[in-house]
Amino acid sequence: MSGHSKWATIKHKKGKEDARRGKLFSKLSRAITVAAREGGADVAMNIALANAVEKAKSYSMPKDNIERAIQRGAGGAGGAAYEAIVYEGYGPSGVAIIVEVLTDNRNRSAAEVRNIFSKHGGSLAQPGAVAWMFERRGSIVIAAAKYEEDDVMAAAIEAGADDVVQDGDQFEVLTQPADLAAVRDAIEAAGIAFDQAELTMVPKNTVQLDEGDARKTMKIMDALEDSDDVQEVYANFDIPDEILETLAG
């Protein structure tokens, strides 16, 4: 679990830096618009929209931007018709990778994702080849230095969380997807601040990487996440904290 949760935190910090350039906000807006178009504009009744909005807020996306994205989706007609596609593949050292895309041009996205895998020593796989190695979960990350584990555990488990695990300087609360909002709200009501709360794909098993393979893996991850059409990238690598911090720096 350590590679998953630690990388998620570093990626979140990097995302906040990317948001200053506006690129991340464009991706977040797209996700909100699609969720509103498919499930309606009522956040209380549309779990996908609620999660998309919460993620946008975690990256300090302005409220006006969020509301405009919802209105675009609620309007239905007009604008690009985005399609959700999931690609699966392998990175260096056989690391399993899942790529979630929202695109208005399937051929363009397929060619770009395939090129990124090929350029960085990876390969695309058939649908289902690696998806079985992951499970969809809600994830809430909390700074461990600020709170007692018993307090976090009590608030989370009482609200329906599956587990609370400590990884170095952070707690990760894991939930079923449908329980994420309720657990998040309960943790907040208990006076516990969280760094991020989102739906993610948690690997069932991980591949331990040394520094050389870790560098190669980070290159393919960064290239995929930098693609305009790519919304999320998940992988089952595990990198020791000291190496991960070095690479992130």
Image (cartoon, grey):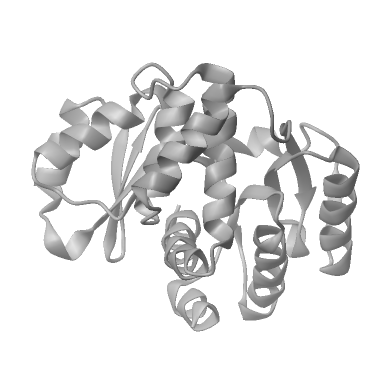
Let me know if residue 3 appears in the view.
Answer: yes
Q: Position of residue 193 (x, y in %)?
A: 18, 51
Residue under the point 70% across and 50% down = 96
Vertical order, 144 against 53 (above or below): below
Vertical order, 156 against 196 (above or below): above
Residue under the point 78% across and 53% down = 90
Which of these two is toward me, 63 or 236? Answer: 63
Quarter residue 46 falls in: top left
Q: Position of residue 249 (x, y in %)?
A: 49, 83
Horizontal side of residue 109 vs 23, given as left or right: right
Vertical order, 16 against 48 (above or below): below
Which of these two is toward me, 93 or 157? Answer: 157
Q: Position of residue 149 (x, y in %)?
A: 15, 50
Horizontal side of residue 183 vs 103, given as left or right: left
Residue under the point 54% across and 68% down = 239
Residue under the point 89% across and 62% down = 118
Quarter residue 153 falls in: top left
Which of these two is toward me, 41 or 193? Answer: 41
Which of these two is toward me, 166 or 74? Answer: 74
Let me know if residue 197 appears in the view.
Answer: no
Q: Position of residue 190 (x, y in %)?
A: 9, 40
Count of residue discs:
0
